[in-house]
Amino acid sequence: MEKLYIIKIGGNVIDNTAKLKLFLSNFASLQGKKILIHGGGKVATQLADKLGLEVQMHNGRRITDQAMLEVVQMVYAGLINKNIVAQLQAYQCNAIGLTGADLNVISANKRPVKEVDYGWVGDVKHVNQKALSDLLANYYMPVIAPLTHDGAGNMLNTNADTIASETAIAMSAVYETHLLYCFEKKGVLTDVNDENSVIPLLNEENYATYLSQNVIFAGMIPKLDNAFAALRRGVKQVVILEADSLNNLENKDFIGTRIIV
């Protein structure tokens, strides 16, 4: 099978002009087929504040009422997505910006109300592998914003890490998929305040041990749960790394966390 990189960029890189530029330069020079998925929650929060909208979170997840949905659509699908696409074109990378609604790429179910009403938040139902494969076959490079749709005319705010994981799983039917989570840290850390405390290799057994010892930062846990789910469902490799290190991925001195099952 041909190799495909599914790369998610998030954290504090998105709103740092210099770091984003370096990442996109490295991304554009990465050889082979690739799909980029981006976050942007911090930028959405900043715009909401400017508009006087209350930002509501629960366990690190954004509650998305109608007003907030309009904000994330503007920020994710407009400001961030098109800025990334324009920069990639400058690096001769023929990018095409998408939400889940475009080409019916990612459909989702509106999250049911349980103990919390998350509003217009979606849980991924289906990733259109054929549509993405057709774009890749024609040398287009998809850049996917963290928005899906419900098939009934509604956009849904959806976690970018989950979109990356589900996209990698779907594409593993026809490609050898490698899922990379890039952000501002060097990898999964045993001490969030020590940049050099990187765990180089993480399997489910030592992950469980770290969890029982409260070693891993809580914000990293959903990302890792997605990583192990992806590996169990056909993804070849998952790596969590610093965005600046993307061009060192294949080097023997690479620093980052490789996830295995």
Image: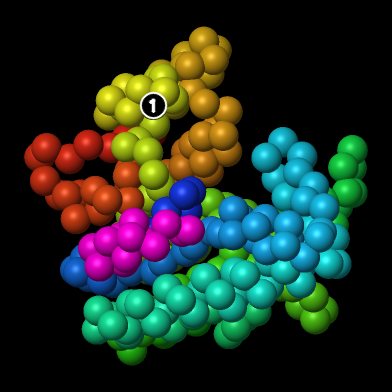
Magenta stretch? 14-26
Residue lying farthest to the bottom in this orientation = 138
Q: Quadrant of residue 9?
A: bottom left
Total number of numbered discs in the rendering:
1
Q: Quadrant of residue 195?
A: top left
Q: Which residue is mark 1?
A: 189
SS majority, magenta? helix
Residue 32 position, x and y percent, is: 22, 70
**Does the magenta-highlighted stretch encompass residue 25?**
yes
Residue depicted at 10% across the width and 40% down the height: 252
Q: Is residue 139 visible?
A: yes
Residue 75 position, x and y percent, is: 62, 70
* Residue 13 higher or lower than 34, as above or below: above
Q: Around disc 1, counting alpha carbons within 10 Å, would you say few (fewer than 14), some (14 to 19), or many (20 or more)? A: many
Residue depicted at 44% across the width and 25% down the height: 192
Residue depicted at 34% across the width and 56% down the height: 19
**Does the magenta-highlighted stretch encompass residue 49?**
no
Residue closest to the eye, 27 or 150 = 27
* Residue 80 higher or lower than 153, as above or below: above
Residue 218 position, x and y percent, is: 58, 28
Residue closest to the eye, 44 or 151 = 44
Residue lying farthest to the left in this orientation = 252
Question: What secondary structure is found at the residue carrying circle 1?
Answer: loop
Give the side of residue 92 with respect to residue 218, left or right.
left
